[in-house]
Amino acid sequence: MITGKCLTCNGELEHYKSLVIAKCSECGAREKTYIMCKNGHYLCNTCASKESIGKIFNNMFTYQDKNPLDVAEKLIKDCGVCGNSPHPMTTAAFLVAYKNLTNEIDEKTVMEGVMRATQIPGGWCGYFGACGAAIGLGVAFAIIKNSTPMSNEERSLANLVTSKALESVSIQGGPRCCTSSVRVSLEVGCEISEEYLGVIFPKRKSNFKKCWVSSFNDDCRKERCTFFNNRGELNYG
């Protein structure tokens, strides 16, 4: 489910320092990548995450939670984390909770935000210096504020939100844990929502005192992670 291994053979993934050409084992598309299976398997961004992202679209409006962290935990459990799915998952969790709490946006608006976030590729945290989950939070604020490249304050806010989430992700260290990045990004969103959106999210119900995801992640940072064992209390809620 959340192993950081090849989705075809469960083998180890190779992370290259320069681009290589790979052929998708499922659709046959050839593209440049930094990551592929040591056994030669490769799934393009679309094929790697299509099942998980499909589940996000099918499940997100069934949740009535009004705290983004609670929505996110259900999405992680029900949809899994693979490919770039944590990026739209972050956007979905924030927008669904915001919609449930305020009724100021509709399902179509949420869908637009999630679709936009699906375009954020996987692996950007280490190769391009910008975690996709943090960008996903910026997408959510951009959607709520109707930001475009020509906007003034709205554009500034979207970038500010992303930068705050990126800082929080950077503090967590590595190797990457997409679940951790989703959680800390949404924590940032909850912390700043009153100031920038005029919204106070209710206390989260999710318990992070022991991270259930760690058993699925061979690369878990364990004691170095905010959420591992009995150290998983977020600053928010």
Image (tube, rainbow, N blue to C red):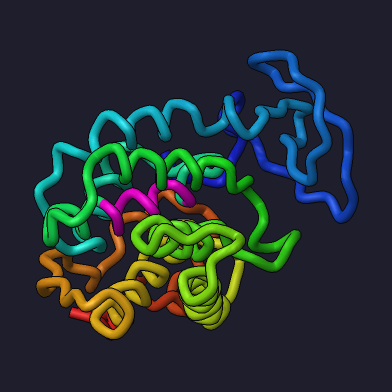
Residue segment shown in magenta: 87-95
- Indicate left or right for 129 with 174 as reference: right
The quadrant of the image that shows the C terminus is bottom left
The verdict on residue 112 being magenta is: no
For the point 54% across and 81% down, the residue is 167
The verdict on residue 94 being magenta is: yes
Q: Is residue 90 above or below residue 175?
A: above
Q: Is residue 231 visible?
A: no
Residue nearer the viewer, 59 or 96? 96
Residue nearer the viewer, 117 or 10? 117
Q: Position of residue 208 (x, y in %)?
A: 24, 69
Q: Is residue 77 above or below residue 193?
A: above
The quadrant of the image that shows the N terminus is top left
- Indicate left or right for 223 with 14 as reference: left
Residue nearer the viewer, 227 or 157? 157
For the point 76% across and 50% down, the residue is 15
Q: Position of residue 188 (x, y in %)?
A: 37, 77
For the point 44% across and 75% down, the residue is 225
**Count of marks, rendered view:** 0
- Indicate left or right for 103 with 236 as reference: left
Q: Position of residue 166 (x, y in %)?
A: 54, 74
Q: Is residue 149 visible?
A: yes
Q: Is residue 100 above or below residue 12?
A: below
Q: Position of residue 73 (x, y in %)?
A: 26, 54
Query: What secondary structure prevails in the magenta region?
Result: helix
For the point 74% across and 62% down, the residue is 128
- Indicate left or right for 74 with 176 as reference: left
Say which quarter of the image contains residue 111: top left
